[in-house]
Amino acid sequence: MYRLYGGLGSPYSLKVRAVLRYRRLPHIWIAANDPTTMGRLFAQVRAPVIPVLEFPDGTVMNDSTPLVAELERRHAERSVVPDDEAQAFAAFLLEDMADEWGTKAMFHHRWNLDRDQIQMGRWLAFDRFRGQGRERIETFGQTFRERQTGRMALVGCTPQNAPVIEASTERAFDLLDVMATDEGYLFGSRPSLADFAWFGQFSQLATDPTPHDLMLARAPYLMRWIAGLDDVSGVEGEWREEPTAAMLGLLELAAEVYLPFLLANAQAAGRGEETFSVELMGRPYSQGVFKYQVRCLAQLREAYTGLSDAAKTRVDGWLPAAACAALAG
């Protein structure tokens, strides 16, 4: 039995839980709100963040991408990685974009406006202190709100960057809304790791007040797709041989936004700089350097250069030359 410690307000927790459900792996979902338990678990991982997955053999891991990869290594049935080598790489890239860029949409909308700050601060506090009194919940909710709004510039969620974050989010909304009605999932009639990654981020937007209203108006079928993907243990399906329109559209968005963002971050880190600026979607974007995202680019480059010639030719046909050059290093 797997034991997954997470939270409803954590996109990565819901991503991993949905993967476990789809793969029909016996597990228990446990709210990560007991300090003693979480202290024991965090002592066994590099960074004290959720979700934390305790494996049946006692292994403890966190960070959703390596968690999903480890589940792939241990279990062959109902894989979330497409069989086709080129599509598997595309799924890895789109998962990475959801985890590292899509989360900006969640953070921006959750902590930008008062209505979202107040509700989500209180709800996240409730998840931790439910049953311990309204005063304690709302006091911690205000403290947590202040802490999170104070971190917005650190993760790039500034007024200057808001147009890029919002425009890229709306593009993804549009692509996935059409996919929900016309194609099912990004790589066929069964979900991939990329579907689960976007589900994780957008599950939060479907809940928080302002992005909920935006999604309902702009992408109503995406909203319903998100509700369904929370548990697709009953879904049977096939990988599609030809790329879906949604996959190609998200790869285009990755080439336009995510890969230039990663490249600028890595170049600034290489020069020992603390911040970087780059033009994305014709707009200025700047933030502090993130070492973790330097590693993300390195991993994408390793995966890309490791492709067979045939698979690389297919990937190169899906991405513009500049994006391929960024991946090639």
Image: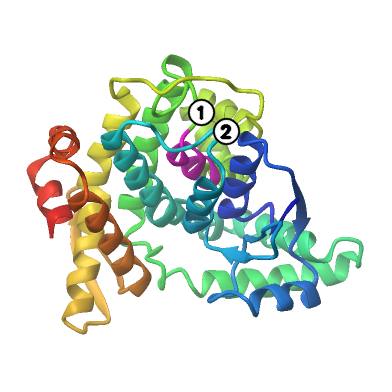
Residue at 73% from the left image edge and 77% from the top image edge = 40
Residue 280: horizontal and vertical position, in percent? Answer: 21, 53
Q: Which mark is residue 79?
A: none
Query: In this rendering, would 13 be left or right of 158?
Result: right
Q: Which mark is residue 226?
A: 2
Please tell me whether mark 2 sits on a helix, a strand or a loop.
helix
Question: Neighbour class for label 2 at 10 Å: few (<14), some, many (≥20)?
Answer: many
Q: Nearer the viewer, residue 268 or 174?
A: 268
Circles 1 and 2, Cβ within 8 Å, touching? The answer is: yes
Q: Nearer the viewer, residue 179 or 187?
A: 187
Query: In this rendering, would 105 be left or right of 113?
Result: left
The three-letter code of the residue at mark 1 reads: Leu
Q: Nearer the viewer, residue 258 or 143?
A: 258
Q: Nearer the viewer, residue 117 or 314?
A: 314
Q: How is the image coloured?
A: rainbow
- 158 relative to 195, above or below: below
The quadrant of the picture occupied by the C terminus is bottom left
Residue 209: horizontal and vertical position, in percent? Answer: 61, 45
Please tell me whether mark 1 sits on a helix, a strand or a loop.
helix
Residue 283 seen by the camera: no
Residue at 52% from the left image edge and 54% from the top image edge = 70
State the CA–CA distance, disc 1 to disc 2: 6 Å
- 298 relative to 180, above or below: below
**Where are the magenta residues, as a range?**
192-201
Q: Is residue 82 magenta?
A: no
Residue 54: horizontal and vertical position, in percent? Answer: 68, 61
The three-letter code of the residue at mark 2 reads: Ile
Furthest residue to the top?
A: 182
The residue pinned by badge 1 equals 222
Q: Is residue 193 magenta?
A: yes
Question: Neighbour class for label 1 at 10 Å: few (<14), some, many (≥20)?
Answer: many
